[in-house]
Amino acid sequence: MNEGRKEIVQLVILLTGIVFLVKLFFVQVLDNRYAELADGNVILRQVEYPFRGLIYDRNHKLIVYNTPEYDLQIVIKDLKNFDSTRFCTVFEISREELRKRFKDMKSRKEYSPFKPTVFMSQLSNIDFAKVQDYLDEFPGFYVQARTTRAYSAPALANALGYVSEISKESLARDSSGIYKQGDYVGQSGIEAFYERQLRGKRGVRFKLRNVKGIEKGSFKEGEYDTLSVPGQNLITGIDIDLQQYGEFLMKGKAGSIVAIEPASGEILSLVSGPSYDPGLLTGRNYSSNFKLISNDSLKPLFNRPLMAQYRPGSIFKIAQAMTALQEKVITPDTRIRCDRSIINCHGDHTNEDLRGAIANSCNPYFHTVLRRMLNKGVVNDPFGDTRVGLEEWNKHITSFGFGNKMGIDLPNEKEGLIPTPAYYDRAYKSTAWKFSNIYSLAIGEGENLVVPIQMANFAATIANRGYYYTPHLVKAIGEDGKPLPQYTERHYTTIDSSYFIVAVDAMQKVVEEGTGQYRAKLADVIVCGKTGTVQNAPPLFDHSVFIAFAPRDNPKIAISVYVEDAGQGARAAASIASLMIEKYLFGGTKRPHIEQYVLNNKFE
């Protein structure tokens, strides 16, 4: 009996021992949770943020680079003997601000007393230098190094965009799982469009600490560390010297300058006026500066080259001419009398052919031409088949890139408006519409709306005699040195290339003996251009518009200039365009009086 009990006790002890051994095996060998908890007391996990890709101009001049900044992080469980008075003195903050920081930190969804949490962000090199010798006085606080954007010149802000911490809303929408709270992302411009190429990939380092929280080197000699991968560099088509000159010329004005290399579609300059210094949207003052800039009544964050939609004015007469030639309602030799009883005109001309009509910007000529196109040759019938004619007209005009987003490598591009029969059906509802309702389209007024980038692309299309590449800022990405594939494709208009010689001849005539001769003409190169004066609501001045390209043969630059409330196109816009062409082709101007005329902002 006793022997049986003894065996049972021994068996229980044996089974109990086996259970403990098995449990110990799981704890020490198979289950690493306890090891992680133990390691958590001596191992500090630090994220290694990647260097964001650099941005260069077409001549490999650095435009955007990275500069160091630091986040002060805290692990609450490591906070010991915290001297708040001393902390406020060292970091130059008030006790109220200190309390607020603790409160805000603990209210964050991702907050944990066992993990590093950002306590103060974006300390500059100078800020960090002031406090680094005192950090050992505050156990539980650690420094996380990262970088912020810096700029070689206070220019190109609207195109470059800015970088800031990812918002909670954007983080919630991110299905990739790439981003974490505290990551910086491109919020606009190139920084946003090329975020995937620029951002790089995070790394992580594990560091050992002693009981006092002092770092003692890498955990297991860095066996579990992963290196960050820097973002890809971008080479743009921008000429930063030309860009700065354009911004210099646009001081005190509202409008835009867009310059393109016709042979590639690369954007040489993208000026939005007024603008801002991109350096203001970096570092600790980002929030306060952003509020000031976004509340500015002049709207410096509004990227006019892509977002402003204007009536094109008389530059549109060239598109009308090309469409009329294609539809065969006129020939280059067709003469139409300047009948000012039909529509008002300007200048001293009477019975021009097509080249002369463009050079003298004859309104009655293009009024008659559009009527022939829309009414399908029924010249004396105002109720001709306008709907059919407008559909054909729209097909040709949109082939120049008008009326649709061009697909530039920047966000927030607008499309403008080229009206269709359906548009007028909605506008007039049950009332019939006809040519007499829409004739102002002929001279670039009425319902026509274009975007400055489309105007510059139009000039490039004429320079190329009928085709264009989608305008783009970035010409080379990373090591392969290529643009995105969509920017290497030619887009042809519906107009026969042979007709473009008429536009080229006429635009040369505009500058040499027409409306652009006084301020757009250059001694050393043939400039082809077209002025435009866009109606504005009184008492404001009209808008000044000019498009051009140069040289006439093998063109190197095509440009559009739009200056709001500046009067005739032959004044402000033509002057600025010619100065930009001169700067790009020859490195500077030989006409200081024209430059001073532009800077005086008195366009009389």
Image (cartoon, rainbow, N blue to C red):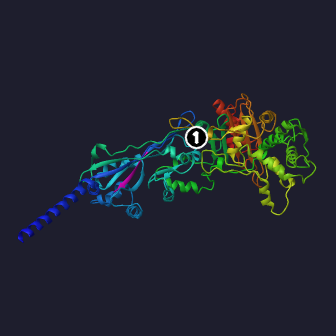
What residue does disc 1 label? 484
Up/down of 21 relative to 352, above or below:
below
Q: Give the image location of residue 91, x and y in percent.
A: 37, 55
* Residue at point 31%, 57% (across, down): 86
Q: In which quarter of the image is the N terminus?
A: bottom left
Looking at this view, name the residue that lies furthest to the right: 380
How packed mark 1 is, by other alpha carbons closer than 10 Å (few <14, some 14-19, many 20 or more), is: few
* Residue at point 27%, 60% (across, down): 81
Q: Give the image location of residue 430, x and y in percent.
A: 83, 63
Q: Is residue 564 visible?
A: yes
Q: Give the image location of residue 526, x and y in percent.
A: 74, 30
Classify mark 1: helix, strand or loop: loop
Q: Quadrant of residue 243?
A: top right
Looking at this view, name the residue that lies furthest to the top: 524
Q: Can residue 517 be seen in this view?
A: no
Q: In which quarter of the image is residue 429?
A: bottom right
Q: What stretch is highlighted in magenta?
A: 68-74
Q: Give the image location of residue 354, x and y in percent.
A: 85, 38
Residue closer to the observer: 47 or 600 = 47
Looking at this view, name the residue that lies furthest to the bottom: 1
Residue closer to the observer: 601 or 414 = 414
Q: In this view, does 29 lie to the left or right of 251?
A: left
Please tell me whether the stretch drawn in magenta is mainly helix, strand or loop.
Answer: strand
- Amino acid type, residue under disc 1 in the picture: Leu
Up/down of 97 relative to 548, above or below:
below
Q: Residue 294 lies in magenta, yes or no? A: no
Residue closer to the observer: 254 or 358 = 358
